[in-house]
Image (tube, helix red, strand yellow):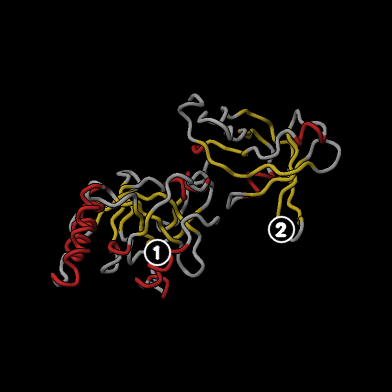
């Protein structure tokens, strides 16, 4: 399989050099650091995409991992790695900021039916289980602060149109004396803007009670959101996506069966208005 056809999984981010023999520190981005960063074998390095222009990142380049070991640096767990052909701190410094990759086909199979890789969840079509109505697609998965991780669901155009119709209907329900003038102005603004709001998303706890069906083969997810959650959709900033939005890291996400307080509509709404650009 060629590089163009292969999917890649990010297992680490190259940090500063360490020592005088070409070793460097790596920030682990995998749930299997001992195997990915400690066992010898082929790995791939990819330079970051240029900051100027719209050129894509260069193709990954294959290296042989000689050895790796875990260490504590400034209170954080990092890995010290040595690649074949990188023999000096100057050569190691040139790799800082590169992504350390493996092919997606090399990932371990997950034994738990309620555990999924982030990369497999991102991009899934999302529908309402009760009606089959299209909701949108999964655009990101956030680490949860409690029992559940959180799905970010980008709403489909049909949902945006429904929100626009609902908003215009509620704004036109006031009295003619108090709301007539303002309502007319809002209607005029809506007409000028095409009648639909900009991109919006909702946050949904990744719990089995709310996400009962995840069908990876069909690239489809069925959800049972709390009543009113879709109406709490927050504006999406699509111009500045987080790097994590790509969902390329080798992270597993469980789907707990027990519903907690994090699954309450209020909690989801608070998250929806809070941190779409916060780094995980």
Question: Which residue lies under the disc numbered 2?
Answer: 76
Question: Which residue lies under the disc numbered 1?
Answer: 205
Left or right of 210, for residue 177? left
Q: Position of residue 178 (x, y in %)?
A: 19, 72
Quick one: which residue is furthest to the left in this view? 176
Q: Which of 150 and 39 is in front in this view?
A: 150
Left or right of 248, for residue 193? left
Q: Please name the residue shown 67% across and 49% down the image.
A: 27
Q: Is mark 1 on a helix, strand or loop?
A: strand
Mark 2 or 1, nearer chain start: 2
Q: Which of 245 and 274 is in front in this view?
A: 274
Q: Where is residue 275 in the image (x, y as percent from the top left)?
A: 48, 60
Quick one: which residue is furthest to the right in this view? 20
Left or right of 244, for residue 204? left
Q: Please name the residue shown 37% across and 50% down the image.
A: 138
125 to 146, vertically: above or below: above
- Give the quadrant of residue 224: bottom left
Q: Please name the residue shown 74% across and 42% down the image.
A: 81
Q: Can residue 123 be seen in this view?
A: yes
Left or right of 218, for residue 116? right
- Give the quadrant of residue 60: top right
Q: Position of residue 74 (x, y in %)?
A: 76, 58
Q: Nearer the viewer, residue 52 or 179?
A: 179
Q: What element carries label 2?
A: strand
Calculate the distance from the C-alpha at mark 2 to the C-alpha at mark 1.
Answer: 28 Å
Q: Mark 2 Cα within 10 Å, few/some/many (few <14, many 20+)?
A: few
């Amino acid at each position: 399989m060629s590089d163009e056809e292969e999917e890649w999984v990010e297992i680490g981010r190259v940090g500063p050099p360490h020592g005088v023999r070409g070793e460097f520190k790596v920030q682990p981005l995998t749930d299997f650091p001992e195997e990915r960063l400690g066992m010898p074998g082929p790995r791939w390095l990819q330079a970051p995409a240029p900051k100027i222009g719209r050129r894509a990142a260069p193709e990954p380049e294959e290296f042989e991992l000689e050895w790796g070991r875990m260490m504590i640096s400034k209170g954080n767990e990092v890995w010290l790695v040595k690649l074949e052909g990188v023999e000096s701190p100057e050569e190691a410094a040139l790799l800082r900021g590169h992504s350390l990759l493996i092919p997606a086909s090399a990932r371990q199979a997950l034994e738990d039916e309620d555990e999924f890789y982030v990369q497999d969840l991102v991009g899934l079509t999302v529908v309402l289980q009760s009606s089959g109505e299209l909701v949108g697609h999964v655009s990101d998965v956030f680490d949860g602060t409690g029992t559940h991780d959180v799905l970010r669901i980008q709403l489909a155009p049909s949902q945006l149109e429904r929100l626009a119709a609902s908003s215009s209907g509620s704004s036109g329900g006031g009295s003619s004396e108090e709301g007539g003038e303002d309502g007319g102005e809002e209607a005029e603004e809506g007409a000028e803007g095409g009648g639909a709001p900009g991109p919006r998303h909702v946050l949904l706890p990744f719990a089995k009670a709310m996400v009962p069906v995840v069908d990876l083969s069909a690239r489809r997810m069925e959800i049972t959101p709390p009543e009113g959650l879709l109406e709490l959709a927050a504006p999406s900033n699509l111009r500045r996506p987080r790097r994590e939005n790509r969902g390329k890291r080798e992270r597993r996400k469980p789907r707990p069966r027990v519903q907690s307080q994090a699954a309450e509509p209020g909690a989801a709404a608070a998250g929806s208005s809070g941190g779409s650009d916060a780094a995980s």
